[in-house]
Amino acid sequence: MKKTLYLFFIFSIISNTPFSQSIDANFSQKKMWKDLKVFKEIRLKANSGLYKYRTKKQIDSIYSWAEQEINNLSTYRDFYNLISILTDYEGSLHNNTLFPQKRFETVKTEKSGYFPFPVKIIAHKVYLNFQIDNIPLGAEIISINNQKITDIIPNMYKFYTTDGINKTGKQIGINRSFSKYYRYLYGLENDFKITYKTKDSDVKKSVVVKSVGYSDYLKNFKNRHSKVFDRLQYNRPNKNEIYTYNQINKNTGILTINSFSIGDNEKSIEHNLYKKWLDSIFVNIKKTTIKNLIVDVRNNGGGTDPNDVITYSYLTSRKFQESKKVWISFNKIPLLRYYNSSIPTFLRPFGVGKFNRYFQKRFPNEKNGKYFISKETNEMKVRTPNKNAFTQNIYLLISPKVASAGSLFAAMLAGNENTTTIGEETNGGYYGHNGHTGFEYVLPKSKIVTEFSIDNIEQDVPKKSNQFYNRGIIPDYTITQTFEDFLNNVDTQMNFALELINK
């Protein structure tokens, strides 16, 4: 009896050590094959965005490649990278590939192996975004451990999804998580040879630095040089920062909306306070001589309906809808056994009825295997401009951070004839996106979680020659922060907008 207890105790220790959940552990190709098959089945049956930006031929081709690629893989991390490639290839900012919680807890507790410093991408170059002794702030990184930075960055794209084939949005994720993504790609490293050059010299220099733990990298990121400028790109705004308005002179005002997460729905206290605030602001604007309104949504990653369309009603002279068309690819939730739920698999069929009825009521019209949204929903409601709407010159500031409800709002505003759009291409698409309802499934062998949104949305925006179906919102003036402004934490885009107005 004592021997049995002893063996059980030893087994428990071994099975609960961090190594057992390491993302670098071996993972059989047989399990990879099983999970890849399930992953593809999930996309085909549940994901309406599978062919939004890719043809059937393209999707079939990348899965054929993936099946062959498994023959070259051996670790859990290898397979995670493969699934991340497939997830990103579809082109939806709401797609995501997540480690199961136990694996990620192991990652978070790793004490070494991580690149120590935050970086910042500016005009396709990668700069050190941290003050240290042996490399100057703003040094341009040429290579890490003899791998060119121009090869490293594109390999990281798969970890941060964007709409269509957009690339600029990925820099938001890379700027924040460069060290983590490097670890996902190449494993843990004892130290890093950084080859760099400074702005005033073409001479390449190299220095070797020790690796750090994941938590130490996060501390360095929190102390990055650019934090004073880009804090709201990576942190939720404080309550008094969510929306603000300032009149800067007799002709110009600045409306800043850093998030549309303002209450859970239109009945919430927060939403109704926001409506009252908007009305008071635009009543006041109407009484003034303001001819120019800068609308700054560069830090707006989305939020809840109907905050986006209510805001747009104060900035348009046309009737509009949130969406022209919305559809999903099923009328009963498919593949329940793989759905990410704490409910035991055998009980799920008994409890799913009300959810299926919800989808059948919301999406009642079937055509060619697509289930279209009811015209009675808020998304299809025809809305009118507010009586206090501003209809003079609008200058819209956008960035790669802008996504989801933020990009829907920005797309509608960019479509106005009186709007000049300034900044960088957004994460979210101009003509549409997959959004609203998020689904999660768990792959049976790896327990990797795959996320996506099931509503295929066509936004109510006009066709414009400078906007493309598979891209984010393209600004009329593409303005990025300059290197000098990065060093001094100067707002290049806002300064450009003010100069343009003055001209």
Image (spheres, rainbow, N blue to C red):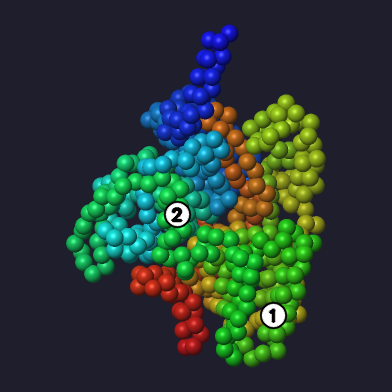
What residue lies at 47% left-to-right and 69% top-to-bottom? Answer: 229
Residue at point 65%, 81% (across, down): 391
Residue 392 at x, y percent in the picture: 62, 83
- Nearer to me, 55 or 396: 396
Taking the image as drawn, is residue 255 in sight?
Answer: yes
Residue that numbered label 1 is attached to: 281
Q: Name the amino acid, label 2.
A: Lys
Left/right placement of residue 67 relative to residue 5 reads left
**For marks 2 and 1 on the same chain, the one whose residue lies earlier in the sequence:** 2
Q: Which mark is residue 246?
A: none
Residue plotted at (72% across, 75% down): 277
Q: Quadrant of the N terminus?
A: top right
Q: Residue at x 54, y 35 (%)?
A: 102
Q: Residues within 10 Å of mark 2 (few under 14, many from 20)?
A: few
Q: Which of the 4 image quadrants contains residue 240?
A: bottom right
Q: Secondary structure at mark 1?
A: helix
Q: Which residue is mark 2?
A: 219
